[in-house]
Structure formats: structure tokens, C-alpha cells
Image (cartoon, rainbow, N blue to C red):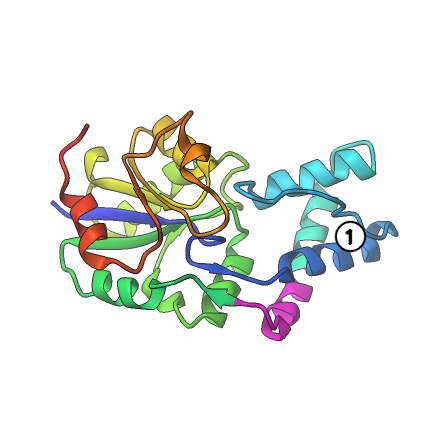
Amino acid sequence: MRTLLLFDIDGTLLLTGGAGKIAFEEAFEEIFEVPDAWGNLDPHGKTDPAIFDEVAKRVLGRLLSPGEFDLLMERYEEIFEERIQQSPRFELMPGVVEILEHLSRDPGIFLALATGNFERAGRMKLKRGAVEHYFLTGGFGNDARERDKILLAAVDYSEEFARERFEKNRIFVIGDTEYDIAAAKKAGVRSIAVLTNGRTRKHFEKDPPDHILEDLTNIPDFMECLESPLK
């Protein structure tokens, strides 16, 4: 029985250095003629569709029509492709390359994504960090606005791609926010929180994950999480 690992992207695997905010504001101003639409929005744990909804309601006083949504997404991704390559503060989180290489060589593990990013944008981020090849499938913001539904889509895609079923107690979500962990609980799967993007253990008191790691640098500790019994 293989283990399915569903990785979040932003804050867990990498940081873009603000490229997403820049691309979004440029796209939004181009289409709706409203500058600085991002404002003081906190993107932590939010899906891309939810961010679109939040900004549109605050700035325009309404949700986007389906046509407007698709147009903004397309233009955002076009601009983001350039901005992500130019971002001087882009960085992979500590230990990411080493642990992904280790996990990818383990025949008992299947790697996939569970991210609120739109797929094209998420893939651009992974490509900039040279880690895209580790993830052949996953769930994205294109699949749903809610993280738990994205997780379930990620499981479905992974099972289809791997041509096998994954038991829920052998599925782990790896994320850096309490929203990742809450979604894992709602989806009925296990979770590993990493404190790599400003979160502390206090952020996870309401919905405690199965495990908390400081980062992804300690491979033996990570593997121990996978082999631990259910609490």
C-alpha cells in the first residue's frame, strides 16, 4: 500500500517574492482600470479563486462574472509568467530539493500537489524552482474554491494517474498554514504542518495537525511522521 503525499506550494515548497501580487495588480488594473487592487489582502492559505472573489467584492462591490473571471485569470497568468522569472526574492524553502529527491526515489510513495494556485501559475512557480518534475498531477484552484474540495480532487487525480487506490490513513497533506490542516481534517486525511512561512505552533492549536515540523530539512523526522500510527 503506497503513501500519497499532497504538497502545498506557497510557503511550503517556495516563496515567489511577491510576484503573484504584482501580476494580479497589473492584470486587474488593465481590465478594470482600478490600481492597487490587492490592498492589504493576506493571501496565506487562500485559494486563487477566493482571492479573486475577495478583491472583486471589496473593490468592485460584486463578484466577477464567469467571463470576467476567466479573462482575469488568463491575463494574470500571462503577466505572472514574466514576473516570476524576474522576481529577485524567489526562494525554495529549506530542504525542499533534498526531500523531494529522497521521496521520489521511494517506491512506496506517490507525490502530488494540493494547492490553491491556478494550475498554470503553480506550475510556473515549480518550474522556476526546478522542482516541477517531481509532481505529475494534483489538485489546483481550477478545481474548486475550497481547499478540502481541492484535496479531494487531488486524491482523485492521483488515483487515476497511479492506477491505484490510496487509503485515507495513508494520505498526508503537507502545508504551512492552519487552512491546509483544517482542509485535511475535513477531507478525512492526515497532515503535516511546516513552520516555514511565519506561522507558529499557536496558529495550529484550533485544528492540530498530526505532526508539526520546523521545516523540511530533517528527512528522518519527516519519514518518521509517515510511519507513525494514527493518534
In the rendered view, tell whether residue 46 sits above or below residue 104: above
Q: What percent of the width, then of the height, locates residue 220? A: 18, 56
Does residue 85 show up magenta in the picture? yes
Residue 81: quarter of image:
bottom right
Judge by depth and name the residue closer to the eye, 113 or 190: 190
Residue type pointed to by label 1: Phe
| Magenta-drawn stretch, dominant element (helix, strand or loop) | helix
Does residue 31 show up magenta in the picture? no
Q: Is residue 6 at least partly visible in the picture?
A: yes
Judge by depth and name the residue closer to the eye, 41 or 69: 41
In the rendered view, tell whether residue 153 sits above or below residue 109: above
Which residue is drawn at the image coordinates 47% and 43% (left, top)? 199
Region rendered in magenta: 77-90
Left or right: 160 as drawn, with respect to 73: left
Residue 13: quarter of image:
bottom left
Q: What percent of the width, then of the height, locates residue 41? A: 69, 42
Quarter of the figure that contains the N terminus: top left
Which residue is drawn at the image coordinates 44% and 33% (left, top)? 202
The residue positioned farthest toward the right in the image shown = 33
Q: Which residue is mark 1?
A: 28
